[in-house]
Image (spheres, rainbow, N blue to C red):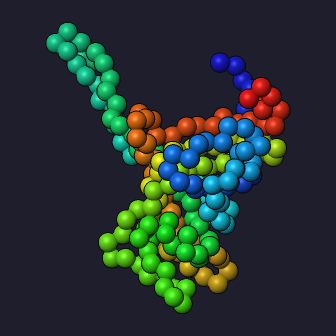
């Protein structure tokens, strides 16, 4: 592999979009910059921590035989997740944070269930870098709170920390698709 300076990614922004589970992934630069109908941006997120990439699992185990102390390696299943600190206090944001079964009351307040159910969505995370984009797509992801609400002082925006965990969609053996860095010029022939 050779060095490719054009492939370096220096994120200047991020956009989180959700849609119905199994919504098709945008394939072109134009549709990553402005996703088609059905994809909804979750709103303002933190500029301090654009995306909190996390994973669980992936433990490595070296397997031995009577003849070799290291014959093979086994790797446990991995769950990928993406964290975002959402700043908007809307019903949609409350569903992502508190669960899909929140209830909107007549006066606009949101009632929080004591037995929450995560909201399942398709997820698109688009990282911008000048006139280029890169990202991640999950046909099915579970959204729920990642930690307590932060409202620490009068000089900062409050945050609803959300964690999107990528899940295997029906009939698939993968949970995420990585979208390599691209520009509008890369769309020719797509």
Residue at figure coordinates x 56%, y 79% from the top left: 152
Which residue is situated farthest in the bottom direction here? Answer: 107
Position of residue 173 in the picture relative to residue 32 (left or right): left
Which residue is more in the foreground, 47 or 93?
93
Residue at figure coordinates x 59%, y 75% from the top left: 90
Q: Is residue 181 above or below residue 36?
A: above
Q: Give the quarter of the image for residue 151.
A: bottom right
Which residue is more in the foreground, 36 or 77?
36
- How many numbered discs? 0
Name the quarter where the N terminus is drawn: top right
Is residue 5 in view?
Answer: no
Q: Is residue 155 above or below residue 47?
A: below
Position of residue 97 in the picture relative to residue 43 (left or right): left
Name the quarter where the C terminus is drawn: top right
Instruction: Please provide percent x and percent y for residue 131.
Output: 82, 44
Residue at figure coordinates x 75%, y 40% from the top left: 29
Residue at figure coordinates x 81%, y 46% from the top left: 130
Is residue 137 in view?
Answer: yes
Q: Is residue 102 above or below residue 21?
A: below
Instruction: Please provide percent x and percent y for residue 74.
Output: 31, 27
Instruction: Please provide percent x and percent y for residue 17.
Output: 62, 55
Position of residue 20 in the picture relative to residue 88 (left or right): left
């Amino acid at each position: 592999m050779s060095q490719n300076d054009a492939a370096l990614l220096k994120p200047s922004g991020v956009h989180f979009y959700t849609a119905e589970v199994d919504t098709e992934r945008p394939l072109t630069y134009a549709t990553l910059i402005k996703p088609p109908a059905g994809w909804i941006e979750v709103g303002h997120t933190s500029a301090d921590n654009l995306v909190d990439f996390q994973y669980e699992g992936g433990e490595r185990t070296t397997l031995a035989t009577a003849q070799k102390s290291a014959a093979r390696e086994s790797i446990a299943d991995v769950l990928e997740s993406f964290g975002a600190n959402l700043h908007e206090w809307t019903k949609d944001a409350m569903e992502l944070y508190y669960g899909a079964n929140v209830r909107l009351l007549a006066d606009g307040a949101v009632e929080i269930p004591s037995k929450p159910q995560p909201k399942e969505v398709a997820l698109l995370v688009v990282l911008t870098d000048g006139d280029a984009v890169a990202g991640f797509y999950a046909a099915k992801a579970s959204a729920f709170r990642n930690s307590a609400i932060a409202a620490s002082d009068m000089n900062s925006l409050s945050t609803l920390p959300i964690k999107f965990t990528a899940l295997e969609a029906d009939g698939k053996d993968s949970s995420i698709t990585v979208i390599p860095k691209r520009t509008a010029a890369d769309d020719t022939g797509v």
